[in-house]
Image (cartoon, grey):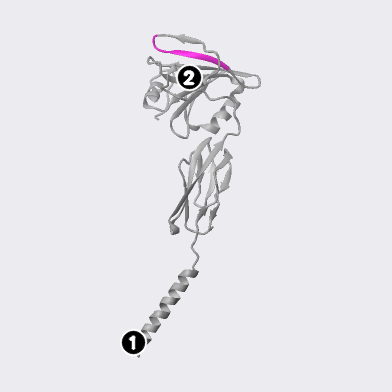
Amino acid sequence: MKTQLVKNLLVICMAISIFSSCNQEEVTYQLKTLSKEALTRVTFALEVSPATSGWTFNSKNSNIASVSDSGVVTTHYVGTTTLYARQEAGGFVDSVQVTVKPRKTFYEEPCLSFFALEQTVREFEAATVYSIGSSEMFYTLYTRECGIGCTFDLKYYFNSDNEYAHSSLCFNSLFTDDVIDHVNERYIFISEKRNGDLVYRYYKNPGNSLLIEQYSTENKLWLSYHPYTVQAIDAIQNDTTRRVFDF
């Protein structure tokens, strides 16, 4: 009798368990925010479902866009990065691509394919090429429209192997504010050093592949684009015309 009672209880428990599991809805986790484009210096929230606790967020490149513990995104510099959302309870991971666009574009960036051959630079530029050569390097010179009433000189420098080493842009100092606004949306300020009356400011791109040197004379504003390499940094540090910080 007792044995039969135990068996009946087991059957009832199993039935209740099966019934409960059949009626328990499976939770579906989702990152509802799709690919996103935004200007610099704005915030927006990632939308997740369900909006419960247990979500964690991070950014592949927080220099371009960072994300808080609660999923609030803040854009910083121009570029593209990936944001990740994780829900530990369900083992769920998803991502969204965020593209940050500039508020202002004052001039067209020079070719940034460092160490490429001359032909690559020529193909990038549509302007007429003016060549000046020497035993060490040669450069090509362009003057391009960058805004109403503004032109600038652009020089490409090549090393002895005919590889693109760096470029230099020269603006009229009347357009200093416009140029600096353009740079500040795209490049991270690192430091500045003074040498006499000249102040050298240094920037890098969010991907740490590009170094920019900026300084002004009485009537001119100069920008030099360099690859962010040990060799390029050494060349700048060894230039006795300026003193720079420890990169």
Residue 197 is a magenta residue: no
Q: What residue is shown at x 43% (from left), y 30% (from top)?
A: 209
Q: Can residue 6 be seen in this view?
A: yes
| Amino acid type assigned to the residue bearing label 1 in the image | Thr
Badge 2 amino acid:
Val
Quadrant location of the C terminus in the rendered image: top left
* Local SS, label 1: helix
Q: How crowded is mark 1: few (under 14 residues within 10 Å), some or many (20 or more)?
A: few
Mark sitting on residue 121: 2
Q: Mark 1 points at which residue?
A: 3
On the image, the x and y values in percent for residue 132 come to: 47, 9
Residue 136 is one of the magenta-drawn residues: yes
Taking the spot 58% from the left edge, 46% from the top edge, the residue there is: 44
Residue 4 placement, left or right of 215: left
Please tell me which of labels 2 and 1 falls first in the chain.
1
Write the start and end of the magenta stretch as one range.
135-143
* x then y, percent, for residue 32: 55, 51
- Whether residue 196 is visible to the viewer of this picture, yes or no, is no
